[in-house]
Image (cartoon, rainbow, N blue to C red):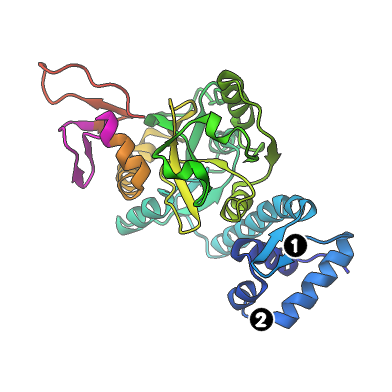
Amino acid sequence: MELEVRHLRALCAIADTGSLHRAARQLGVAQPSLSTQLRRIEEALGGPLFLRAHTGCRPTPLGRLVLSHARPLLTEMHLLVTEARAAAADGTGLRIGSTASKALAGWLRRLRAHGQDPTLHMNVSANALLRMVAEGQLDVAFVHEVEGCPLRIPAELPLRVLVEREPQFVSLPVDHPAAVKPEVGLDDLAGDRWMIDPTVDGEWDAVQRMFRAAGVSPQVLHGDYHTADALVATGEVVTVCQPTRTPRPDMAVRRLKGDPLGVRLLVAARTETDLDGVYPALEEAYGEVARLAPAYREWLDRERLGREWPGREWPDQGRLSQGRLEPDGPHGPPSPALP
């Protein structure tokens, strides 16, 4: 049997839902049919992809390997179809590239509300997206630059900083002993398995530096962050996450003590006109998701940096301007960079 796109979609549905029953409902097929399909896929690949138990399905090491390749392939297939349809319709909308962000949905919604017709290209590699803008394949790229791992930014691209330093948080099982704390130290997680996506530019190196600085050496697994979320929920791993990540009933999001890991959020475009056309909507969208993430909102309030976000005033008045907070007048102390 040769693997097809529908087989990869079925595997991802099982991993995401943690259940053959729920995956079958999501895919619109009968559970016995999905079970038979999974068995044939496993026979074709040479081993079990999921551990079945009364509590649900968990990926095996082989399953995690397959999923780490399946998800990017599905994303690329979706992109192929989207771009082909746009080309067939002679679409001339704004072409946006982005690394993962909770702000994307709100950003696209705002752009459409203002009469723009954006298409979205997702990629875990910020350097690849920046290169696509420079080569004319994209108009705009919203990317994350991991602290200590500078991106290769083409000199000709206009650039704007959305957030100078965004602290990275950690997601862990909701019943993890450290989840009772609002702020978690790396020593609290030294005995856990961590899952890190090594395909994210700079991520692996930055996390390893963080561990060395803290004097810990936990076991680190490779995997994409969709898979990591599923494994966090079942208690298998903990993982780095963006502070805008919202908690779930089976997953807690906590600050890392001392904020040892950070990223810079950048927007690059082919022209200043393109940049001016998309930046205000992104700023508003990011402010929205920051307010809706409890741990991040508490962090901002604690640091007294969230003076004003679009649509909502924070305790101390000020304004967000290219990733920095500027004081309202000349008499206050200078404001530090927004995290």
Mark 2 or mark 1, which is nearer to you? 1
| Residue 269 pos. (x, y %) | 45, 36
Name the element at disc 2: loop
* Residue 312 covered by magenta stretch: yes
Q: Position of residue 117 (x, y in %)?
A: 41, 57
Q: Quadrant of the N terminus?
A: bottom right
Say whether residue 20 is left or right of residue 106. Answer: right
The numbered dot on residue 29 is 2
Which residue is found at the position 66% from the left and 81% from the top? 29
Residue assigned mark 1? 51
What percent of the width, then of the height, locates residue 285? 33, 48
Q: Is residue 277 magenta?
A: no
In-image side of 174 versus 74 (left or right):
left
How far apart are the two marked residues, 2 and 1, measured between alpha carbons? 21 Å
Could you tell me if residue 278 is visible in this image? no
Q: Which mark is residue 252?
A: none
Crowd band around label 2 with a 10 angstrom C-alpha radius: few (<14), some (14–19), many (20+): few
Quarter of the image holding residue 16?
bottom right
Tell me which residue sits at (29%, 29%) in the image.
303
Looking at marks 2 and 1 on the same chain, the residue that comes earlier in the sequence is marked by 2
Is residue 51 visible from the viewing direction of this image? yes
| Residue 32 or residue 157, whichever sits in front | 32
